[in-house]
Amino acid sequence: MSIIHTPLTRYPENPILTPEQMPFRCYTVMNAGATIFEGKVLLLLRVEDCERQTDFYVATSTDGINFDVCETPINLPLTEQEKRYGASHRFDMRITFLEGKYYVCHAAWLGKYGSCIGMATTEDFVNFEPIPYLSEPSNRNAVLFPEKIGGLYARLDRPQNVDGSGYTWISYSPDLIFWGKAMPLDLPYTSWNRNKNGAGSIPIKTPHGWLEIFHATAETCSTENYYLGVALLDLEDPSKVLASPREFVLAAEKDYECMGQTPNVVFTSGGVVMPDGTYNIYYGGADTRMCLATTTIKTLIDYCHADPKGKNSHVVFN
């Protein structure tokens, strides 16, 4: 039994996808982007083979739990920059439905130049059209907002500092190519997120603000542990954090989260709201397998608005 009280409930049969369950030989399956497509939950799985080469595979489900995995990876063409500078792999998809099509954001590793943000569009998850330019390095963990803000596209991302730390920023674009007006998010600085924090799920618009599930890390005596947190961002200016609990909402404590390629990791790249109102949050466990936690939008909003002097020791920004 968990000793940590959070607004998330782990699916009792976790993990929901493991390398052994894939219809092909592989080393890991993790960090999937998530959306609803043609009435089904669709995941874009990050899969590493036994040479540790990465591809993305589509998986679909009618119930959000039991998935059918395509046996062949998607064909996501390289941009000219990726070709020129020798992109060795991509990782950690996020999926946003916007203006009648699906936008996918991913990180692209350009060798000595570090990681950059790549984007592409699709209408069927078979044919993908890359947006031609990558971000400057070193940047990753990009999520595109599901609507324009102030007439501009908006994106959360995580630039990397020279010391390896990195924190969540927001930037804006008129055309998805030129990005500017960058501002950091003032998320709580605590013992579990002092090293890194970055966007996880696609922000969900609510009357109380944009609801965002993010990841964060902190060094322990043995590993860099990953956690999940939650925040409400201002609808008109998402750089303003309206409320964010000082406590994490999920930490690695189960075997499938603590043991694997990267120990002590819970990491989300997306979630979906199911027809019954359940918010399914899909997350990678130990960079090895896919897991599921459930909650509701109301539960998370209530958690964000909890009494700052209560047992959860929340901090609320105004």
Image (spheres, helix red, strand yellow):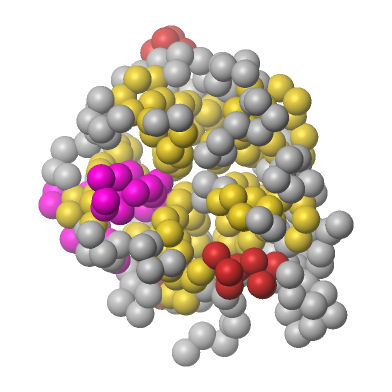
- State the residue at coordinates (79%, 77%): 307
- Compared across the picture, whether 79 is left or right of 143 comes to left
| Whole-percent x, y for residue 172 in the image | 67, 27
Camera sees residue 144: yes
Write down the quadrant of residue 236 in the picture: top right
Write down the quadrant of residue 48 in the picture: top left
Write down the quadrant of residue 279 in the picture: bottom left
**Image vertical order of residue 78 relative to residue 18, above or below:** above
**Image vertical order of residue 196 relative to residue 184, above or below:** below
| Whole-percent x, y for residue 132 in the image | 45, 14
Which residue is more in the foreground, 205 or 56? 205
**Image vertical order of residue 68 relative to residue 182, above or below:** below
| Whole-percent x, y for residue 312 in the image | 73, 79
Residue 266 is covered by the magenta coloring? no
- State the residue at coordinates (77%, 52%): 241
Q: Which residues are magenta?
A: 16-44
| Whole-percent x, y for residue 57 in the image | 26, 42
- State the residue at coordinates (79%, 83%): 310
Which residue is more in the foreground, 104 or 168? 104
- Compared across the picture, whether 304 is left or right of 211 comes to right
- Compared across the picture, whether 283 is left or right of 127 comes to right
- State the residue at coordinates (64%, 25%): 152
Residue 27 is covered by the magenta coloring? yes
